[in-house]
Amino acid sequence: MSKLIKLAFKVQYFATRVQSVNSKAKAFTAIDFYNNLLLNTPTNKNGRYKFETSDVGHFVNMVEKDNIKEAIEGFNNILGHNNQVHCGIKDKFMLKCIDFDQTKYVMDALKFHSAIRYFPHPSVIMTLAKKLDDEGLIELFKILKTCPFLRIDSANLSSLIKDDPKISYEVYRVALQKKIKLQPKDLYRIARQFLSGNKVRKVGFMTQFAQENGNENDIYSSLSVLFTHVYLTNKQQAIVELAKVIEHKDGLTILKEEEQYIKPLLEILQKQVENDEKWKPRLDELISKLS
């Protein structure tokens, strides 16, 4: 269990005085302010400090990079005293932690958000996501999938799609878990990556997902289904879907724009039907329309 949660659940409530790294400095720091709070804040009959919301907010406002680790210790102690700290103040503190490279602390806060009564604004999650490397992003997606009260909208989630099947697949799984409707073009950006040779499981669900979340008249929905069928070697369905794309009013234009992805897809599809007397001529006919 993380240090954050241990403090939140602590049975014995006591003051934790933080040693300031700026103890010799003349400026009155966040740590000085926090230690002063411990001397002047009343306690209830159980020995819990009754910190005022305004005081906690002022403490957070004063936190700087050179005292962030000590500030985290102080903030944990405030949470450990079971105070109803407003989520807006927690948001501000988490944003400072992200800015000051304390992302692991924020990840723990998200993972155990219910225990510390923290329901972050989506902007905190997005700010954190932009700071993380790919490994950290995958860990964040796991947290989002298992924590129903952590919110993120379609536009923000789509902005995390990368040209990396592992990352994009996790974006798709978050959308599926949270019932977030991705735009057809964003879903296509995910689908087109699964011919890269990177073996990602359960891609077959994307067919149904594309159909449920897209518009049958939207070419990007059709492209998502096309890539999925080719990946799953559903050659007949793939050719039917390719025909639908070509017949779309913008089909030839978009296929040309997406040539770097469409060309290898067609090469795979050609291999799938090379010995099929019925479907090979049909595919050849469709490909001829692209030239």
Image (tube, helix red, strand yellow):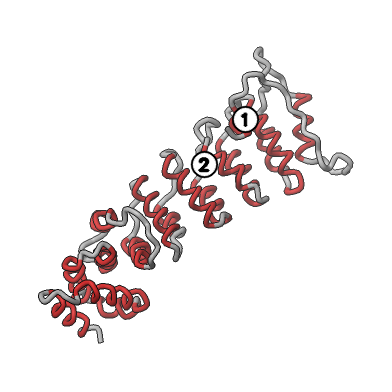
Which residue is more in the foreground, 136 or 58? Answer: 136
At which x and y percent is residue 43?
69, 18
Q: Which residue carries the number 1 mark?
A: 79
Amino acid type at circle 1 is Leu
Seen in the picture, residue 175 relative to 20 is either above or below; the reply is below
Answer few, some or many: residues within 10 Å of disc 1's Cα (few below 14, many 20 plus, some between 14 and 19): many
| Position of the C terminus by quadrant | bottom left
At which x and y percent is residue 286?
18, 80
Amino acid type at circle 2 is Pro
Q: Which residue carries the number 2 mark?
A: 120
Upstream in the sequence, badge 1 or badge 2? 1
Number of marks in the rendered image: 2
Q: Are marks 1 and 2 in contact (CB under 8 Å)?
A: no
Q: CA–CA distance between discs 1 and 2?
A: 15 Å
At which x and y percent is residue 258?
34, 76
Using residue 170 as the reference point, say whether residue 263 is left or right of it. left
Q: Residue furthest top?
A: 45
Identify which residue is drawn at 75% across, 33% down: 34
Rendered image quadrant of residue 2: top right
Answer few, some or many: residues within 10 Å of disc 2's Cα (few below 14, many 20 plus, some between 14 and 19): many
Q: Is mark 2 on a helix, strand or loop?
A: loop
Q: Which residue lies furthest to the left in this view?
A: 278
Q: What element carries label 1?
A: helix
Using residue 275 as the reference point, say whether residue 103 is left or right of it. right
